[in-house]
Image (cartoon, rainbow, N blue to C red):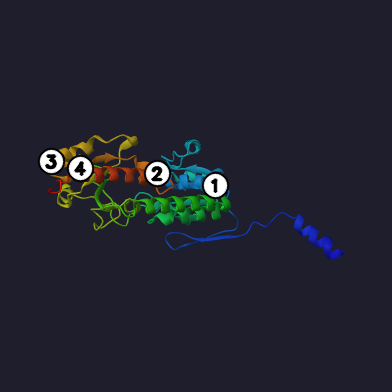
Amino acid sequence: MARAILFALLLALPAARAEVRVTDDYGRELRLAAPAGRVVSLAPHLTELMYAAGAGARLVGALEYSDYPAQAKALPRVGSEAAIDLESLVALRPDLVIAWPNAGSARAVERIAALGIPVFRSEPRELEDIARTLETLGRLAGTQAAAAAAASAFRERARRIERRYAQRARVRVFYQVWDRPLVTVNGDHVISKAMRLCGGENVMAAVPGLAPEIGRESVLRADPEVIVASGPAGARPAWLDDWRAFPALAAVRHDNLYAIRPELLQRHTPRLLQGAEELCRILDAVRLKRTHSEPPLPS
């Protein structure tokens, strides 16, 4: 009888908040005594991933340009990637900071870690990394079920796109991030992985650096069949049409100059597959033009 009473009392106690252990994208182990309840995001894509993982309510601060979903716009700001406001960040009393260290933020991220604030560093390189990061954020924030569902949906959508376009003819693509300086992505960038889903081939795949600056002559030598550009605020950038000054370029000759909203391909979030589907439609249009421009077979 006494054992039964003791067992019933144990069941009535609140569940212990178990320690969380994960390894970040830089191979560093992160331990939390319990799932994080106050999280600051230092990258717009990580803010979006937190909401996708069902953990948006845990966010207490974010960087500028964390604008999706709509709720993210109301989060207190802790500066920009180039100028993180450490005082404002510390005042939010985070028990976890999630970061994407880059040239502008790496030093500040190290200072945050030196203050004893747990930091999860993220740098997705593969489409699978997006699903895996969703699951990891779910573990860190205690929203595993929602995160697992989001990761599963992402993987299935990626498989559907790949199955649909796996047998399509290859299309040579130049992706333009910016104009001055001329910036693109190489084959290790997740945007190149999205291209491959659609049967696209990045003409700058072999260039060193994830987001290298290149000369215009490199593009002319590569002679891509299509140029796809991101644009400020989602608009078609005026500089995309500057390529028309080179009429011998295949992409110009066949009028294959297109723009995709940058947040759909340049943020490592589930919306990247929306951008991939848009890119797939563009490449299908290029293939159709290619077919119509081929000379007729001799009778």
Cα–Cα span, label 4 and label 3: 19 Å
165 lies left or right of 215: right
Q: Which residue is mark 4?
A: 292
Of tags 4 and 3, the one toward the viewer is 4
Q: Is residue 216 left or right of residue 148?
A: left
Q: Position of residue 56 (x, y in %)?
A: 53, 44
Q: Quadrant of the N terminus?
A: bottom right
User: Between tags 4 and 1, which lies in front?
Assistant: 4
- Nearer-the-camera pick, 130 or 141: 130
| Element type at mark 3 | loop
Whole-number angstrom distance, CA of label 2 to CA of label 4? 28 Å
* Residue assigned mark 2: 274
Q: Please state which amino acid type lies under the numbered disc 3.
A: Pro
Q: What percent of the width, then of the height, locates residue 163? A: 38, 54
Q: Is residue 92 visible?
A: no
The alpha-carbon separation of the residues under discs 4 and 1 comes to 49 Å
Q: Amino acid at mark 2?
A: Gln
Q: Residue at x 29, y 45 (%)?
A: 284
Crowd rating for badge 1 (residues with CA inside 10 Å; few <14, some 14–19, many 20+): many
Which is nearer the eye, 74 or 262? 262
- What residue sits 26% from the left and 56% below the top? 205
Dots 3, 1 in contact, CB < 8 A: no
Q: Which residue is mark 1?
A: 55
Q: 159 left or right of 18?
A: left
Cβ atoms at labels 4 and 1 below 8 Å apart: no
| Residue 271 seen from this side | yes
Task: Say which amino acid is labelled 4.
Answer: His
Is label 2 in a helix, a strand or a loop?
Answer: helix
* Residue beneath the point at 42% across and 56% down: 128
In the image shown, does 157 or 117 lie closer to the viewer? 157
Disc number placed over residue 142 in the picture, else none: none
